[in-house]
Amino acid sequence: MENSVNQMVVVVGPESEELDKVLTQLQIQVHRADTFKLFKKAFRKHRPGVLILHVNDSTSEELASQVLSHIRVGLQDKDTTFIVAHPPQHMPDALNWIEEYSIASFITLSSEKLAINQSVIERNIKAWQRFVQVTEQHQAESNLLMSVAHLHRNNNNVNEVMLQFMQALSSIACASAQCRIKINAQGEGTLTSYAPDINTLESALTQAFQLPTLPAYLHRALKEKKPQIDLLPSAEAFSLLGQILSLKLSSYLIFPIVVYGKVLELMVFFIDESAMESVSMRQIDVISKAAEQLTMLLERKESERRLKKQCTRLKSALIELKETQEQLAHSEKMATVGQFAAGIAHEINNPLSFVLSNFGSMDNYLDSILNLQNLHDQFLSAVEMGNQHRRDEIKDEITHYRGQSEIDFIYDDMREIVAQSQMGLSRVSEIIKDLQSFHGKSKQSQLDLKTLLAQSLTLLRSTEPSDIPIKTAFSHQSEIISNAGFIQQILTNLIKNAYQILEINEISEPIIEVSSEEQGDNIYISVKDNGPGISLEQQKRVFDPFYTTKTVGEGTGLGLAVSYNLSKRLGGSLLIDSQLNKYCKFTLVLPINADGSPH
């Protein structure tokens, strides 16, 4: 496994010669930030595992508190390691900080404690590296288990599935070479594939295993039908193999592929002496679980194939829709007619991303339901055969599996996911229909602003997670009869824009207000934020397509232009009111008795 541990350390606070002396001899990358804004930029860019907070006065202590609160509370990051460095004359409230923010270490900066401080920092860096390595190992184990359930969605060819599974298993077992031995009805073996691809490796493996007959250690795996790991039985038998690979092979892992109680083949992995310390009992347990899942996959291949076909068809349609959106956004930037089409591409991104994100959960839920269905099938078979002992065993397995997989929660969550996905896809469908009937009449319905706002926030949370509070005040009395999709898209764009402005400018107490009021023949729906505001010069261009005040990569300049065009199609308008350093308010004006036809 490649070492992807980030060895970058970020130092937050004023400069310190004593701290520099400590860090110089550690031979690590150091990035410095003396303001909260610089820290956030450095944290986003480098994602360091260790942060050193230099505190020498009340100002730096306040900065440190701000950083700690942002990481632990704002980002809910419980893993980043914090070290607080301070001079002898300024000691922060250590007990309170340790309790509230889980500070790993406090170090006192002085020449007498140079070696101790170096040791403390080095120990924390190594602890972080171990944490990341363990996390990556667990992720690799999880990937192995998940790959079994997902392989059938990539290829219907069983042999291809086996090769991919063998590669994943080789990675987790730290193997230097591997091969597959097909077992016939007489219990004899034939070498079918091997890796790495070296010409002389095939004959060396055949000689070492004494094929087609099987040596005792292979027969044991054939009989027990469980993964086996042990030292190589004979150094002489595998000496040629070691010479070919230029390795000192010491151990092997045998993985039997069992389907309906019959061993179809053996996967054999050779482990170098230097890699044995990386193999643990935990990995053996993971490999055993993978064997169970792979067996289930092979036994239920046909039913999985049908599910894959349906899932692939739906995924292809969604991906094609997303690709169409990207093509529209790109091509229509070149002409005035394309402004609206590019806007449509921008509109469908939020609900489409939301729906696509749900399919990961649905895939896992389907696997759990199929597993439970298989247990129920076995239970019914046992009942029909009158095998009470087997029936009781399977009944206990069903009870255990229902609790382990939280099947009741899965049923409830699937209904919610389907409902939310249907809502998002309906939004996309409505937008596409509106694009196809650009000159036609908009679909009208009676609207509930609270419901539209709740739906908009649900879609936004998948792409713009934020804890900024939203205050609502709806005072209009008349019914709103208009196009729900258009109004929801306008609300989504305006609230998303407010989120981004408040977070980019790091407003200390951010708030967004959504309100409505009725004046004369119009209803006014407003979205107001307490951000930096927009100058009069910028207000003149704010609804122009592709105009944005954000930095490159943080905005397309389409959101407000799309919202403005939609307001016109509703027979209304979109207004802006702003004061620099105070607020910015966008107001959607809707005619109460308008028919919604394009103006």
Image (spheres, helix red, strand yellow):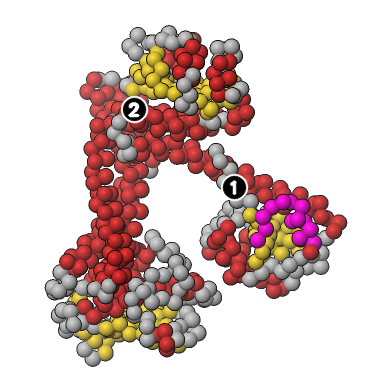
Residue at left offset 33%, top offset 44%:
363
Residue at left offset 34%, top offset 72%:
558
Q: Which residue is mark 1?
A: 5
Residue 530, placed above or below residue 235:
below
Give amino acid for label 1: Val
Give amino acid for label 2: Asn
Residue at left offset 61%, top offset 22%:
248
Task: Using residue 280 as the reference point, say whether residue 548 is left or right of it.
Answer: left
> x and y percent of residue 94 in the render?
72, 61
Of residues 545 and 54, the one drawn nearer to the viewer in this rendering: 545
Q: Which residue is mark 2?
A: 159
Q: Please report contact status of discs 2 and 1: CB closer than 8 Å, yes or no.
A: no
Res 408 seen here: no
The secondary structure type at the circle numbered 2 is helix
- Badge 2: how crowded within 10 Å, few (<14), some, or many (20+)? few
Q: What distance separates the C-alpha of mark 2 from that of mark 1?
A: 35 Å
Task: Using residue 103 as the reference point, say whether residue 598 is left or right of it.
Answer: left
Q: Is residue 420 magenta?
A: no
Which numbered circle lies on residue 91?
none
> x and y percent of residue 159 in the render?
34, 27
Residue at left offset 31%, top offset 36%:
155
Q: Is residue 19 magenta?
A: yes
Q: Quadrant of residue 326?
A: bottom left
Of residues 88 and 450, the one drawn nearer to the viewer in this rendering: 88
> x and y percent of residue 383 in the render?
25, 24
The segment highlighted magenta reads 18-31
